Amino acid sequence: MADVETVPAAEVPAGAALLDVREAYEFEPGHAPAAVHIPVEEIPTRFETELDPDEDYYVICRTGGRSVQIAGWLTAQGYSAFFVAGGYDSWITAGKPLESSSGEEPRIL
């Protein structure tokens, strides 16, 4: 796996392309606005058709375990991917926005 650049959640630029690799049951109750959602196990079959190879992706999950693996894998495929350190736990601590798919109060699972 390729080396991957780590970015603290607080330093993810506004409007950055965020790739959320959690499961659907985790994504629906709470996620970053405009996040692209592709669960970990679906990345190998969906990345070429759903991700722009010219875009910088900030990869996020709950705490960072899954996203660091996917960021490294995408980097090895020639994509520009950054690991969001600390995942959504750090995202919330940094005061970054959240929304839910249902419109209810967002929560992170």
Image: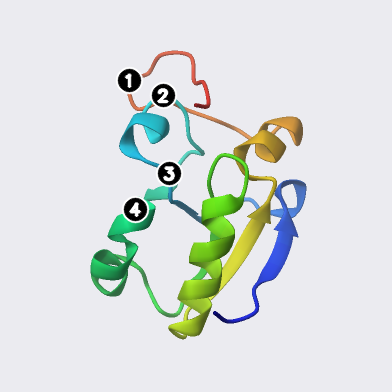
Q: Are marks 2 and 1 in contact (CB under 8 Å)?
A: yes
**Mark sitting earlier along the chain (4/1):** 4
Relative to 65, 24 lies left or right: left
**Mark sitting earlier along the chain (4/3):** 3
Relative to 7, 78 lies left or right: left
The residue that disc 3 covers is: 22
Circle 3: residue type: Arg
> Disc number at residue 29?
2
Neighbor class of circle 3 (other Cα within 10 Å; few <14, some 14-19, many 20+) is many
Q: CA distance from mark 2 to mark 3?
A: 11 Å
> Disc number at residue 57?
none
Circle 2: residue type: Pro
- The residue depicted at 25 percent of the width and 65 percent of the height is 46
Q: Are marks 4 and 2 in contact (CB under 8 Å)?
A: no
Q: CA distance from mark 1 to mark 3?
A: 17 Å
Q: CA distance from mark 2 to mark 1?
A: 7 Å
Can residue 59 be seen here?
no
The residue that disc 1 covers is: 102
> Disc number at residue 38?
4
Neighbor class of circle 2 (other Cα within 10 Å; few <14, some 14-19, many 20+) is some
Q: CA distance from mark 4 to mark 3?
A: 7 Å
Q: Secondary structure at mark 2?
A: loop
Can residue 11 be seen here?
yes
Neighbor class of circle 1 (other Cα within 10 Å; few <14, some 14-19, many 20+) is few
